[in-house]
Amino acid sequence: MIFSSTTVVTFLLEACAATGIALSVLLVRWKPKYGFLAWIITVCFVPIWIGVEVKTFFSAITVVSVVLITGLVHFGQFRLNLVDWFMISLIGTCIIANALGLSSLPANFAITIWAVAYLFGRLVLVQMSPAWIYHCVAVSFTAVAILAIIEFLTGVNIFVLMRMKNSLYEIWAPLQIRGGMLRVEGAFGHSIALGTCLAMAIPLAFSSNFKVWVKVLMIGCMLSAATLTFSRTGMICSILALLISILGTRNSLSIKTKIYTISVLAIITASVLPFIGAVFESAGEEAAGSANYRGDLLSLLSDMRLIGISPSFTVTPNGEATFGAFRSIDNALVLLGLTYGLVPLILMSCMLLLAIFVVASGRAEPATVAVVAAIPSLVTAALLTQYEVFFWFMIGVAGVSQVLRRDTDLDKHQFGQPKGGVWQQDLRTVT
């Protein structure tokens, strides 16, 4: 049998890829911390259009997540928490919709990405300390924020130089302008995605073990970058994340420090409002029109099935997908209902209401605060690029961290201060 040079090269590349994956799995099993560090770097600095094509396109963050899950998972007793049951129900309804022929291939692929991101968040917290996760997120998103500020000052986004010939690059690489100003987006492909991810990183940075002045600088960079997205959603989510972190969680800050921090935030906000207002005023009908369009999307609620894609879904002759008269659904919750049905939408809403309740009760962990802070983005944008992965990852972390907190508080009440780290002593509860 004669093999062509192309066949040999392809075989060698596939063998190298398989070897690399196997070594990566072993490395993650040996040092889980390195795996999470690789994951957060991929989220922050590898655009969504970078990936591999195997019959269908897999982004780099999806590939990395699957490899890390393979390395992190330990087969054995696995106790499910309440959020796990919500996710199982959500995915189960989508499987039923697919079995009944009420789904589509893109919809199935999207829910798979959500499940992978959630499972990674579900596993990562029981393999390493929360402090390591908070440190990695804080440092990585501080770097993201600094690069975003440089992007605004120079007008150059280095990530769009990472070209790939695929539709994702065509969709997400073009830069956005609002009121004559560049809307920074970093590696996230969209200003709303960047702004919301920065907002979700703030509670974790706030809870890290860095010195107070270091945390202030980090969060200051994140807030500045969120402002330069010129996204109302990103700015609202970021301020909400900081306020809940200060007022709605148990932390070591004194009352005096909290008052000082809020006062500084109020002064900074008041000082930048004229600049932000001028940009939105220059944007004129563009900014107002986007807000009105999102309001009009609520008319689609009546088009939702209990399970499965809405009957209003059509594909135009040129290949564009639409729901009724709407091509772009800038509302993640409405899009969830239209794509998967009312039942998944209700399940998702229950998870969000549960997170809000935990925050309101003052028992929220940083990941839960991050999820609640991101809620405004769910009604103003679809789940975009790495934001989609980071959001579902955070839900997975939130579910585990709340169980760990609950059982640790119970141990303290019954037996006094427990020995060892929270993540070490309570793995029996979540695994």
Image (cartoon, rainbow, N blue to C red):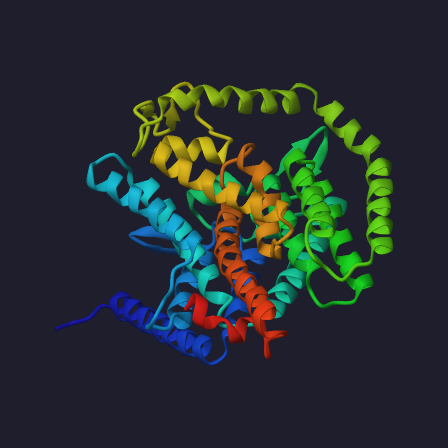
In the rendered image, residue 58, in percent from the top left (x then y), is placed at: 39, 54
Q: Is residue 21 rendered to the left or right of residue 186?
A: left
In the rendered image, residue 376, in percent from the top left (x then y), is placed at: 59, 36
Q: Report the residue that reaches farthest toward the left.
A: 1
Q: Nearer the viewer, residue 136 or 256?
A: 256
Q: Residue placed at 50% from the left, 52% from the top?
A: 395
Q: Is the residue 182 above or below the residue 299 in the image?
A: below
What is the number of callouts on the image?
0
Q: Is the residue 238 above or below the residue 270 in the image?
A: below
In the rendered image, residue 352, in percent from the top left (x then y), is placed at: 51, 42
Q: Is residue 182 rendered to the left or right of residue 59?
A: right
Q: Residue placed at 68% from the left, 38% from the top?
A: 236
* On-image quarter of the N terminus: bottom left
Q: Is the residue 213 above or below the residue 225 in the image?
A: below
Is residue 208 visible in the rendered structure shown here?
yes
The quarter of the displayed image where residue 325 is located: top left
Q: Residue placed at 86% from the left, 37% from the top?
A: 271
In the rendered image, residue 331, in percent from the top left (x then y), is placed at: 50, 32
Q: Nearer the viewer, residue 135 or 408?
A: 408
Q: Nearer the viewer, residue 282 or 98?
A: 98
Is residue 186 visible in the rendered structure shown here?
no
* On-image quarter of the C terminus: bottom left
